[in-house]
């Protein structure tokens, strides 16, 4: 998605009227546009290759783990998501447990925390 956005930005820059007025700017934006398109095609090839190699739904998380050294922020986001999901499941089971118990004062207090 990030490389698609960069390609869109470079295309928008190419359509800017300033490119017609300034040849130096046009040359720079054209080089930028070419680089962004090459980066996007490279990313698409890698994603396709990873999906074809693994051929299952879990391959995306496997791909993230393979590139964790290249994209440390992505790795941290995946870990935070997994931790949050575990916390949610743990708290959801507590809520279900308290809902099954008799509705007394202390149980209701814990249920509405």
Image (cartoon, helix red, strand yellow):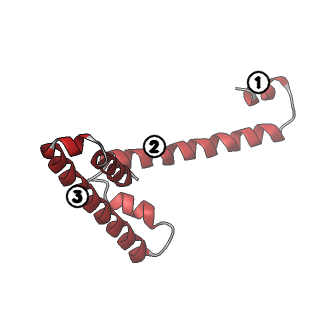
Identity of the residue drawn at 56% across and 46% down: 85
- Residue 66: horizontal and vertical position, in percent? 32, 61
Crowd class of label 1 (few under 14; some 14 to 19; many from 20; radius 10 Å): few
Q: Name the residue under label 3.
A: 34
Q: Vertical placement of 77 versus 57: above or below?
A: above
Q: List the single residue furthest toward the front.
A: 21
**In front: 54, or 45?**
45
- Residue 77: horizontal and vertical position, in percent? 42, 45
Crowd class of label 3 (few under 14; some 14 to 19; many from 20; radius 10 Å): some
User: Would you say 14 lies left or right of 80 here?
Assistant: left
Residue 109, label in figure: 1
Q: Vertical placement of 99 versus 63: above or below?
A: above
**In front: 99, or 9?**
9
**In front: 14, or 91?**
14
Q: How far apart are marks 1 and 3 (CA)?
A: 61 Å
Q: Vertical placement of 95 versus 15: above or below?
A: above
**In front: 98, or 32?**
32
Q: Nearer the viewer, mark 1 or mark 3?
A: 3
Q: What element carries label 3?
A: helix
Q: Is mark 1 on a helix, strand or loop?
A: helix
Q: Distance between the residues labelled 1 and 2?
A: 29 Å
Q: Name the residue under label 2.
A: 80
User: Would you say 52 lies left or right of 91 here?
Assistant: left
């Amino acid at each position: 998605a990030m490389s698609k956005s960069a390609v869109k930005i470079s295309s928008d820059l190419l359509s800017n009227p300033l490119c017609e007025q300034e040849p130096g700017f046009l040359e720079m934006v054209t080089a930028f546009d070419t680089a962004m398109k090459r980066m996007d095609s490279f990313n698409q090839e890698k994603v396709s290759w990873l999906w074809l190699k693994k051929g299952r739904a879990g391959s995306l998380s496997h791909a993230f783990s393979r590139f964790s050294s290249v994209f440390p922020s992505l790795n941290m986001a995946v870990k935070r998501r997994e931790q949050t999901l575990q916390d949610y499941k743990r708290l959801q089971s507590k809520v279900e447990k308290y809902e099954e118990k008799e509705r007394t004062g202390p149980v209701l207090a814990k249920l509405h925390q």
